[in-house]
Amino acid sequence: GQWPVLLGTLSAGFAVGILSRLVMGGESTAFQVVRGWTGIIAMLLLITETVVQFLVIPTLSDPPGPAVMKVWEGVVIAFTAAYFGTRA
């Protein structure tokens, strides 16, 4: 199934966010820039996910397979989890 992979990307993304905070220091300018860009990228990925799921995929005659969607969803989850990891 896809749940172990998605839970793995969730955990890895969150851990990367926490580790970046520990390594860079939560108050450093570089960390705040990384956190800001991670949040922007996560928002853009979530908006893109919504558009793709509701507007693009229904119009395709040959929709992407489960393997492609698993990778895409893993990337979206990892970036979103990384952002929340930096906030923890």
Image (cartoon, grey):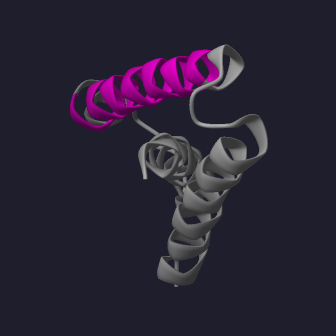
Look at 54% across and 27% down and name the residue there: 35
Count of marks overlaid on the render: 0
Q: Nearer the viewer, residue 64 or 16?
A: 16
Let me know if residue 24 appears in the view. yes
Instruction: Reply above or below: 26 against 36.
Output: below
Farthest residue, direction right: 23
Residue 87 position, x and y percent, is 42, 43
Instruction: Reply above or below: 66 against 42.
Output: below
Farthest residue, direction left: 54
Residue 1 position, x and y percent, is 52, 85
Q: Main secondary structure of the magenta part?
A: helix
Q: Is residue 49 left or right of residue 36?
A: left
Instruction: Reply above or below: 34 against 5.
Output: above
Residue 5 position, x and y percent, is 60, 74
Q: Nearer the viewer, residue 58 or 51?
A: 51
Look at 52% across and 68% down and name the residue there: 6
Look at 68% across and 37% down and name the residue there: 25
Residue 21 position, x and y percent, is 64, 43
Q: Which residues are magenta?
A: 32-54
**The stretch drawn in magenta includes residue 37:** yes
Q: Nearer the viewer, residue 42 or 72?
A: 42
Let me know if residue 56 appears in the view. no
Q: Nearer the viewer, residue 62 or 31?
A: 31
**The stretch drawn in magenta includes residue 69:** no
Q: Is residue 85 left or right of residue 19?
A: left
Look at 45% across and 26% down and name the residue there: 39
